[in-house]
Amino acid sequence: PDLDACLKTYQRSCAVLVRNHGLFVWSLTWEKAKIMTECIDYLLDLAIDMIRHGIPLVKEEVTESVNPSEDYHHIFY
C-alpha cells in the first residue's frame, strides 16, 4: 500500500529503494534503466562521501515544492 501511494505521488520516478530488498529501477528500455542505475549508484556513493566528511546533503534554505519530482522532470524526459 505504501509503495502504491508513493508511485502514484511521484509518477515520473524511475526507481524505488525498498528496505531489505534493494533498488528497483525501470525505464522504457533496458539501456536507459542501466544508465539510471549507474547514475543513482554514483549519486549514492557521493552522498556517502559527503556524510563521511560532514558536508550537508541539502541547503538549509530549501523551498518546499508540492511534488519535488516535477521540478526535475525535464532532466529525464
Image (cartoon, rainbow, N blue to C red):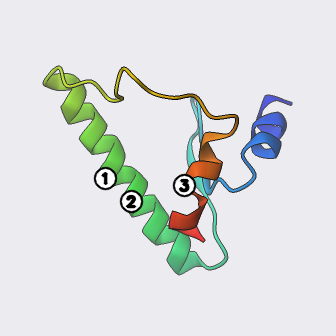
Q: Is residue 72 above or below residue 61?
A: below
Q: Quadrant of residue 21?
A: top right
Q: Is residue 12 left or right of residue 50?
A: right
Label 3 or label 1, whichever lies nearer to me, is: 3
- Judge the density around disc 3: few (<14), some (14-19), many (≥20) Cα neighbours within 10 Å: few
Q: Is residue 34 left or right of residue 1?
A: left
- Judge the density around disc 1: few (<14), some (14-19), many (≥20) Cα neighbours within 10 Å: few
The CA distance from mark 1 to mark 2 is 5 Å
Identified at 26% across, 33% down, the residue is 48
Residue 75 in percent (x, y) is at 50, 65
The CA distance from mark 3 to mark 2 is 15 Å
For marks 3 and 2, the one nearer the N-term is 2
Identified at 63% across, 63% down, the residue is 26
For label 1, the residue is: 42
Report if the CB atoms under discs 1 and 2 are less than 8 Å apart.
yes
Check disc 1 and give the amino acid type: Tyr
Check disc 3 and give the amino acid type: Tyr
The circle drawn on residue 52 is none
For label 1, the SS is helix
Q: Is residue 6 above or below residue 69?
A: above
Q: Is residue 56 above or below residue 48?
A: above
Q: Is residue 53 left or right of residue 6?
A: left
Frontmost residue, 71 versus 53: 71
Check disc 2 and give the amino acid type: Cys
For marks 3 and 1, the one nearer the N-term is 1
Residue 33 in percent (x, y) is at 54, 69
For label 2, the residue is: 39
For label 3, the residue is: 72
